[in-house]
Image (cartoon, rainbow, N blue to C red):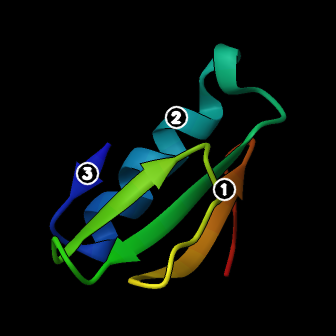
Amino acid sequence: MEAKTIEQAKTIAKAQSLEKKYKDHTIYIIYCNRTEKFYADTDGLVRNWEKPYGYYVNGVYTP
């Protein structure tokens, strides 16, 4: 899921982390310099043009 601001990305990631199908899965928040957007995803692979911001596990944020 993509978002324009970090606050939107955190909201999306927290909501996903609380869903039953993502229980005990990590939802990463990543900023992409190429698209200038934030992404919330289960894939924690960070490429050269991306910067990790933190992650949620079961609704708990870790920077």
Residue furthest top as drawn: 21
Count of residue discs: 3
Q: Looking at this view, is 14 or 53 the one in front?
A: 53
Q: Which residue is drawn at 53% across and 80% down?
A: 53
Residue at the disc numbered 1: 56
Q: How far apart are marks 2 and 3 (CA)?
A: 13 Å
Residue at the disc numbered 3: 2
Q: Residues within 10 Å of mark 1 (few under 14, many from 20)?
A: many
Residue at the disc numbered 2: 16
**Contact check, label 2 and label 1, Cβ < 8 Å:** yes
Please identify, in this view, whether the residue under mark 1 or under mark 3 is nearer the observer.
3
Which of the two labelled residues, at mark 2 and mark 1, occupies the earlier sequence position?
2
Q: Please, what is the three-letter code of the amino acid marked with disc 2?
A: Gln
Q: Residues within 10 Å of mark 3 (few under 14, many from 20)?
A: some
Which of the two labelled residues, at mark 1 and mark 3, occupies the earlier sequence position?
3
Residue 38: % across, % down:
31, 67
Q: In which quarter of the image is residue 9?
A: bottom left
Residue furthest front as drawn: 48
Residue furthest right as drawn: 24
